[in-house]
Image (cartoon, rainbow, N blue to C red):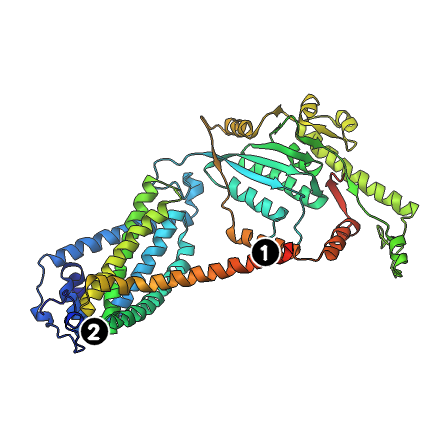
Amino acid sequence: MNDPQSPNPSESAGETAAWSRPSVQEAPVQPGGKRLMRVLLGLYALAMLAALAILLRNGSGDQKKTGINPGELLSAARPSGVAWITINGVITHGESNSPWGRGMPSMVRRLRRLAERKDVRAIVLDINSPGGSVGAVQELHSQLLRVRRESKKPVVALLNDIAASGGYYLASGCDAVVAHPGTLLGSIGVIFHTANVEGLLSKIGVRSDNIKSGKMKDIGSSTRPMTKEEHELLQGIIDDAYGQFLHAVSEGRKIPESELKPLADGRIFTGRQALALKLVDELGDSQRALELAGKLGGISGKPEIVRDVPDSLSGFLDMLDSVSSLRLPAEAALFQRLGENFSGAGLEYRWRP
Amino acid sequence: MGFLEDFLMAPERAALRAQERPPVAAAFGAFVLAGLSLAVSKAVLSGGSIAFLAFAAAFAALMRVSAGTLMTALVHLLAEALGGRGRAAGLFALMGASDLGWTLALPAALLLRALAPGAWWAPLLCALPAAFAVLCLRARSVRGNYGLSPARAWAAVCLPYAAFAALAAAASMLLVAGLVQQFAGLIS
C-alpha cells in the first residue's frame, strides 16, 4: 500500500473506498537530482540560445552580407538545383480575385520566390500554353526579364505540346529554348476576337440600345456590325501590339525584325521546323532542358529539381471551384461557353484555331 | 524546481507532492515552455525568422496550455471512470511536467538542421520521439496520481486521442460521402 505505483486496490477488491496514500516525507528521495536538473537546464538554455542566434541571423538580413541562406546555416552543404516552373493553359489574370486563383499573378509569385532562393542556380520554364491576354503575357514576360537581370540566373524554356503566341512570347525571353520535335509553336501575332450576335438576338426579341458619349465608346460591340472606321482603329491597335510582339521576339532571339517578319504572320511550326528557323535552340526532352539549365547555372553533375511547395489549400479550393462549375446544367454550361466566345473582347497573344 | 526534480528522479514522490500541494503555476510554466520549444524547433527547421517567431511562440504556448487543460479534464474523467482516485489539480501539475518532454524537440531540431538540412522528414523525426516521451510520462503520471494499473493508465491517456481520431475519420467519411453524392448527381 505504500507504493503509489501499484494498482488501485479497489480494482481487485471491488471496493469503492478512497485509496489511502503515503505522505511526501515517506516517499524515497533520489540523490543527485539537483545536479542532473542543473545540467539539463544548462543544456536546454544552450540549445535555446543557439536556436535564437540562428533565427536572429535569419531575420537580420545578414544573408546578403555573408551569402549564407537561412537554410544553410549550421549545415554542411546544401545541394544546388534547378527550379522547375510549369506554365499551363491560357495565360490570364485569373477569372476571379480569389487569393487561390491560378492565373498569371500566381505564376509571377512562384517565379520570384524560386529565383530568390540561394539553392536555385537556374530555372526551367516548362511551357504548355496557347498564349493569353496581352496584359497578362507582357506582365509575365517583363517579370521574367527582371528576374533574369536581378538574379543573374539563367532561364531555359522547355516547350511541350504547344507554345504558341503568348506561350512563345515568354519562351523568347529565356536564355535558351528547348522544344520537342513535334511541339507546336510560333503563331506570332495578335488577335482581337469579337462576334456579331445581332441576328440571334433579334430572333428571340432582344434589341440592344447604347447611349454613349462618343461614337467609339462601344467599339467591339457584339450587338451590331462593326463600322469601317472602327475596323481601321482596331487594326491600328492590333498592328501596334503586333509590333511589340515582334520586337520582343527579335530582341530575345537575336533575330533581326526584317528576317522575323515573314515568319510572324501567325503561322505555327513544329519544333523541327522552328530549329531550322532559329526560333528554338535545340530539340530535346525535359531531361535535356534540365541538364542545359544545370550547365548554364554552373552545376556540376546531375542537377536536382527544386519545386515550389504546392499550396494544398489552393488545390482543394480549385477542386471545389471545378465541382461547382460542373454542377451547372447543360444549358447554362452552353451559354457560359458562348459567353466566353462572344464577350470579353480584348487583345490577345493567343492561338485561337 | 523541487517538483520537477522529483518528477524526473522520484516519480512516486512527485505524484504525492502533486496530490498534497499541486504546483499549478509551475505546470502553466511548463506548458508555456513546451509550446515555446515547439515553435522554436519548427522555426529552426523551416528557416523562419525571429520576427515571425514571436507570434508563433505565443500561439503555440496558448495552444499547449489550452490542450493541456482540456486533456487533463478528459484524462481525469477517464481515470476516474476506470476506477482510479486522484485530484484533477494534481494531474494538471503532472501533465505540465510531462509536457516538458516536448523540449527534447529543440536539440533534435538543431541536430537535424545540421545533419539533414531541408529534409522533409526532419520535423517528423523531431516530433515523434518527443511525442512518445510525453505520452510515456503522462501514462506514468496517471499511474502515480490515480493508482491505476499500467494498462488502465495507458488507456486513460490514449482514449481521448482515439476519440479525436474516430471523430476526424467520421468527419472525413461524411465529406467524402458528400462529394460522391454530388458527383453521382452529376452523372445521373
Q: Residue at x 43, y 61 (%)?
A: B168
Q: Is residue A69 left or right of residue A51?
A: right
Which image quarter holds the N terminus of chain B?
A: bottom left
Amino acid of disc 1 = Leu
Q: Is residue B5 above or below residue A219?
A: below
Q: Residue furthest bottom?
A: A17
B106 or A10, which lies in front? A10
Q: Could one spot residue A100 in this view of the protein?
A: no
The picture places residue A138, in percent across and down from the top left corner, at 68, 42
Chain letter behind tag 1: A
Q: Residue furthest right?
A: A228
Q: Could one spot residue A10 in this view of the protein?
A: yes
Find the distance from the CA under tag 2 to the CA under tag 1: 50 Å
| Label annotation for residue B85 | 2
Q: How many callouts does the rendering have?
A: 2
Q: Secondary structure at mark 2?
A: loop
Tag 1 residue: A320
| Label annotation for residue A217 | none
Q: Is residue A123 above or below residue B67?
A: above
The picture places residue A135, in percent across and down from the top left corner, at 70, 45
Q: Which image quadrant for residue A86? A: top right
Q: Residue furthest front?
A: B188
Q: Secondary structure at mark 1?
A: helix
Which image quarter holds the C terminus of chain B?
A: bottom right
Q: Residue at x 56, y 42 (%)?
A: A111
Q: Is residue A101 left or right of residue B7?
A: right
A183 or A232, which lies in front? A183
The picture places residue A349, in percent across and down from the top left corner, at 73, 40
B126 or B186, which lies in front? B186
Amino acid of disc 2 = Arg
